[in-house]
Amino acid sequence: MKKIISIYIFLVVFTSLSGRDKYTDKRDGNVYRTITIAGATWMAENLKYKAKDGAYFFDHDYNNVPGYGVLYEWKTAMSACPTGWHLPSGTEFQTLANHFEQKETWGKIASDPSSFGIQLGGMQDYEGTFSEMDESGYYWTSTEYDKSNAEYFSYLLINEMSVIDISREEDIADIHGTEKPNKYSVRCVKD
């Protein structure tokens, strides 16, 4: 009897501990790995929720969703995270970037439990062109510059070197990318 109770206790503890690093989206049943970094719990995968409007599959191919997630216009990204989660601000992404610059690598390996699991889902620009899959990950932030532009976070691989950047409002005149109709990936942070 002691052995059965010990096994039961082990299974309860193991199940509760292993469940702490996953979140199931009740809207569609997608399960996301999570990771806590600098006190904030992040989804460690790109959001896969297909909103009614403003959500797209790379190259219009649903087969890209499991590995790369869905691409969102900024307006849709603002409400795409499930209840209890939110689209991170630029400041939250900067805290994330600072953590990885100081402590560890970004870890593209999604199966590594300490990895943020960057997924290089590319983007679709405001003209409708899909590009950069497996080369870059662009992520909307909740920080709005003006009625036409918003901040984004990017992770690029250039000659196998990672380049991490957050767009800056003062650079809008010189770069494209901040236009709200662009389609970028979303990561959510727990409220």
Image (tube, rainbow, N blue to C red):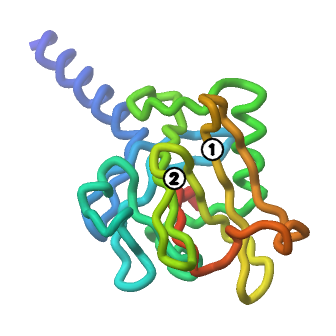
Which quadrant of the figure has residue 145?
bottom right
Instruction: For the C terminus, give its image quadrant.
Output: bottom right
Whether pointer 1 and pointer 2 mark residues with C-beta atoms closer than 8 Å, the reply is: yes
Question: Foreground residue, 177 or 42?
Answer: 177
Looking at the picture, which amino acid does disc 1 mark? Leu
Q: How far apart are marks 1 and 2 (CA)?
A: 9 Å
Does residue 2 appear left or right of residue 164 in this picture? left
Mark 2: give few (<14), some (14-19) or many (20+) Cα within 10 Å.
Answer: some
User: Judging from the image, what secondary structure is the residue with disc 1 in?
Assistant: strand
Which disc, if any, is residue 183?
none
Residue 81, placed above or below residue 54: above
Give the residue displayed 36% in from the left and 61% down from the top: 48
The mark tally for this picture is 2
Q: Disc 1 vs disc 2: which is toward the camera? A: 2
Which disc, if any, is residue 156?
1
Looking at the picture, which amino acid does disc 2 mark? Glu
